[in-house]
Image (tube, coloured by chain):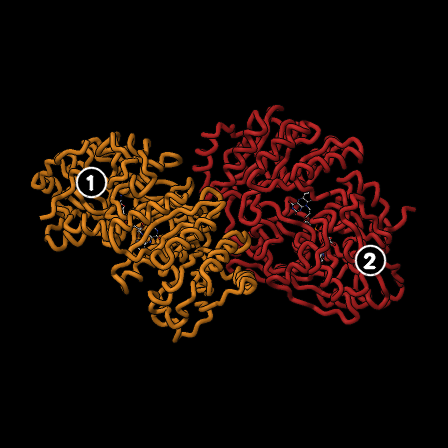
Chain colours: A red, B orange
Amino acid sequence: MAHQFKNDLAGFKADLEGIAIEENPALVKQKSRDFFWYSPVLKRQLDHVTADLIVTPKDEAEVVRIMKAAFAHDVPITARGGGTGNYGQAMPLSGGAVLNLAELNKVKSITPGSVVAETGAIVAQIDKETRAHSQQELRMHPSTANTASIGGFVAGGSGGVGSIRWGGLRNLGNVIRLRVVTAEAEPRTLDLTGWDLHKAVHAYGTNGVITEVEMPLTAAYDWVDVLVGFDDWMTAVRYADELAHADGLLLKEIAPIAAPVPHDYFLRHQKFIRREQSVVVLMVAPQSMDAFLAFTQRAKGEVLIRYDQASPADLKGLPPAFELCWNHTTLRALRVDPSITYLQTLYSPPDHIEKIETMTRIFGDEVPGHLEFNRFDGRIAASGLSLVRFTTEARLEEIIRIHEDHGCPIFNPHRYTLEEGGMKQTDEIQLAFKKEVDPKGLLNPGKMIAWEDPNYDYRSQKTYLFPGLQQAS
Amino acid sequence: MAHQFKNDLAGFKADLEGIAIEENPALVKQKSRDFFWYSPVLKRQLDHVTADLIVTPKDEAEVVRIMKAAFAHDVPITARGGGTGNYGQAMPLSGGAVLNLAELNKVKSITPGSVVAETGAIVAQIDKETRAHSQQELRMHPSTANTASIGGFVAGGSGGVGSIRWGGLRNLGNVIRLRVVTAEAEPRTLDLTGWDLHKAVHAYGTNGVITEVEMPLTAAYDWVDVLVGFDDWMTAVRYADELAHADGLLLKEIAPIAAPVPHDYFLRHQKFIRREQSVVVLMVAPQSMDAFLAFTQRAKGEVLIRYDQASPADLKGLPPAFELCWNHTTLRALRVDPSITYLQTLYSPPDHIEKIETMTRIFGDEVPGHLEFNRFDGRIAASGLSLVRFTTEARLEEIIRIHEDHGCPIFNPHRYTLEEGGMKQTDEIQLAFKKEVDPKGLLNPGKMIAWEDPNYDYRSQKTYLFPGLQQAS
Ligand SMILES: Cc1cc2nc3c(=O)[nH]c(=O)nc-3n(C[C@H](O)[C@H](O)[C@H](O)COP(=O)(O)OP(=O)(O)OC[C@H]3O[C@@H](n4cnc5c(N)ncnc54)[C@H](O)[C@@H]3O)c2cc1C
Ligand SMILES: Cc1cc2nc3c(=O)[nH]c(=O)nc-3n(C[C@H](O)[C@H](O)[C@H](O)COP(=O)(O)OP(=O)(O)OC[C@H]3O[C@@H](n4cnc5c(N)ncnc54)[C@H](O)[C@@H]3O)c2cc1C
């Protein structure tokens, strides 16, 4: 269904009287990018991509007007929150308008157990307000909480800090309600709940523009950041796994990272870490500290630093522990060594530990281990965010293939489509919903293969290339 | 090490000037009993058991004086909280004094994530105060919350409502600190934390008298009580299991109970339940209701009643849903049919569903199913509290043996010792601690086989009979 868009910008702008529009090419390009450059593959493919203009609504009514104009004038619309996504999720492959939702940023209401916020609200800001209101916080947040929007998290993220307790965003109950504006001649606003949420969660903004989200909250604590060191990587992994299985210990984050990554790339923490130490990064509830320390001592883990007892001198300039985790691990490595990239792997139980051991044995320091423990359908699993010392795209593909041959599926972060980064199959529910709410395919073109090419063969092993992708000039 | 106690009551009383003592035989007998009569076996063995007197301290200093006097005069001491324990846990097998801790009942302090209370504080009262203070509650409570003491729960209980999220009391982190008074010539007060907690948790008061507990708290919600009906038992079980694995749904209780138990024995709920319906009893957080209902609808469960939307007429006289669960299921059955008793089974993952199905096939309505889903070392497991339509002790033993032969271990509720009701082996840590803090064996005599008979052979298949057990008159 991929087609050329008329992209009548003059008509589009004429309909948007009173709504903020930015056309300065440098600023437009800046807001057309995300963290796609993590991937050497995407960097090559997408570096030239830019929108024609940025449009910044200040409320839902303006979003409706914009979508109506987009439909009338056939202008592709790529929604954007904080622009911290990876994989070029928020990049306007066919040009058109980037819909900047940063100004829809109010926290609208807080009750025991839930919060309603506008899509552009910054994740950390929500936590700040819910804490002040009633000692509550979101169940999970990306490690980019300080810059990411809640709508962008739901549309583009998967989970993060807190997923060890609550699983991922895809799990029923981790989003309560989404309000979306459709891309139709007369845009509708729909409130999605229950199973319907799946239509728009993790759809990269291809299935309606989210204007408002309702998320569950949980109790907020003064989480204690702790780094625990082990001289052996697999000992660190097993410690993390057992900790994750300890039902009475309340933790918000458990991430083992293999030596020498912590020492070499966590520059501000370097003084606490020996080079041969693999580190488990943790966030522990204060009421669990006693038990956690007893557990750690028995496991012979070395507490390298606990933030609650560190001196002001030691704490100075230290980022929070969660900014060593998730994709921040990769970011810190990239800053020191730009040749580094990464993979996303699922090590599913019950033999996740054995699989991790096998990958470690095969790749050694070419693919240094980084795991995020989390809950996966009620079971403890490990998500790999292994670093890769990148050499060639061919070798990268080979590394991916070897993982998959050993039962470790890869969610490929070097692809810009939903399917290739995900389950490698058509999501019939999302496809049907797109047909309903976005008949012209205006929303984030090129991201849903099932829409663009219904006959695409996912087993072809080839990378999907969106025919509508802007040509590099 | 079992020996006859001098039990010099005159000397004991003389030392307790100013401390409340009760000697009226009827009142003493009443406070010497618990819910042992659930078991026809224990009823036969223990019905005659009574203390010589009840002593009721009002603070820790009085507890210390009592323990010093007990040591000096060789008087056995059986601690008692609410007296709601099963298995004769709080029954003074060798007479002596029952130490009634009901007046040590203050909630001493509440912080984000934890509460400190005196041992005799009623569990529901703690929740009431922590809710009022900061919208917090205990992670788990027994279904007897309205009458049980927190110290009795820790010393005699195992878990309960909330264990689906937090596991059991035995899990590191589910008790933060216990303060115990020893049974020595000069009684000491010890604060146990970390691994040391195991010395006194679930020790039936054989390892020191608890005076104060510190417990973790979690967020309190207006839990919605829901009963969901299925026409097929195993469908109900599978629904419960999947629900328990749904990480994004916050539930505090998941208990499937096989037809015709709900209809026949839940008299106040009878009007909502058809006789052929198996029922899953649930407590759902309000913020999870939408998702929960979506889940239940897809599973074709029939919502029989949800308390948040029931009419005042329907709600009138209805007990809370959790008082249909745990040992309350048995209690309600016993009230209608006194011949009923029960078993405690562990169906451990990953094949817990298959095991349940096998037991159902073998026993049918002789052993109607009742399961409590909970977390067990990080995995979802089902604890069976199956009812048994009792015929003879021999048949009861046979039912137990068949369970065990099929890999379903029984925690025998028809035995009064720690070991026979538990792991059927010596707990070396608890034994060593008893030697240290109770050298005369004064605390709850007869409950720890390892102490009474170090050479006892647990594989003998025979019931342990405590030689010091009072003779029936
Ligand atoms: C260092 C680093 C660490 C990260 N850590 C994590 C992590 O822990 N967990 C995680 O899940 N992700 C992580 N990410 C990815 C990303 O930061 C998060 O998913 C973040 O929540 C995205 O929010 P955003 O506002 O920046 O979204 P954007 O990047 O602006 O958008 C993401 C996607 O959502 C769409 N979108 C945005 N707003 C809307 C809307 N209102 N309606 C419809 N579609 C919309 C966009 O079109 C795009 O497809 C990380 C990225 C980096 C660079
Ligand atoms: C209908 C019913 C439902 C139940 N449901 C549950 C359930 O859901 N979960 C569960 O775990 N149990 C359950 N039980 C068992 C029991 O009610 C609980 O374990 C309860 O918490 C015991 O508290 P209590 O104050 O009544 O203890 P008691 O019965 O007074 O004592 C229990 C044990 O602890 C010891 N003890 C009490 N206080 C102290 C102290 N201060 N120091 C040292 N030892 C002490 C006693 O000696 C005894 O061995 C149930 C019982 C019944 C009858």
- Estimate the x, y position of residue B226 in percent, counting from the top left: 45, 64
Q: Chain of mark 2?
A: A
- Residue that carries the numbered disc 1 in the rendered image: B465
User: Can you tell which of label 1 and label 2 is closer to the viewer?
Assistant: 1
Query: In the current view of this chain or complex, which residue is farthest to the right?
Result: A473
Secondary structure of residue under mark 1: loop
Reading the image, the residue beneath label 2 is A97
Q: Is residue B98 left or right of residue B172?
A: left
Q: Secondary structure at mark 2?
A: strand
Q: Nearer the viewer, residue A236 or A412?
A: A412
Residue reaching furthest to the front: B362
Residue A321 image-quadrant placement: top right
Marks 1 & 2 on one chain: no
* Left or right: B3, with B404 as reference point: left
| Label 1 crowd bin: few (<14), some (14–19), many (20+), radius 10 Å | few
Looking at this view, name the residue that lies furthest to the bottom.
B313
The percent position of residue A82, horizontal first and vertical second, equals 71, 51
Amino acid bearing label 1: Leu
Q: Are marks 1 and 2 in contact (CB under 8 Å)?
A: no
Residue B34 percent location from the top left of the image: 23, 52
Q: Is residue B205 above or below residue A148?
A: above
Q: Quadrant of the N terminus of chain A?
A: bottom right
Q: Chain of mark 1?
A: B
| Image quarter of residue A272 | top right
Residue kind at label 2, given as amino acid type: Ala
Of residues B73 and A387, which is closer to you in this image? Answer: A387
Labelled disc at residue A392? none
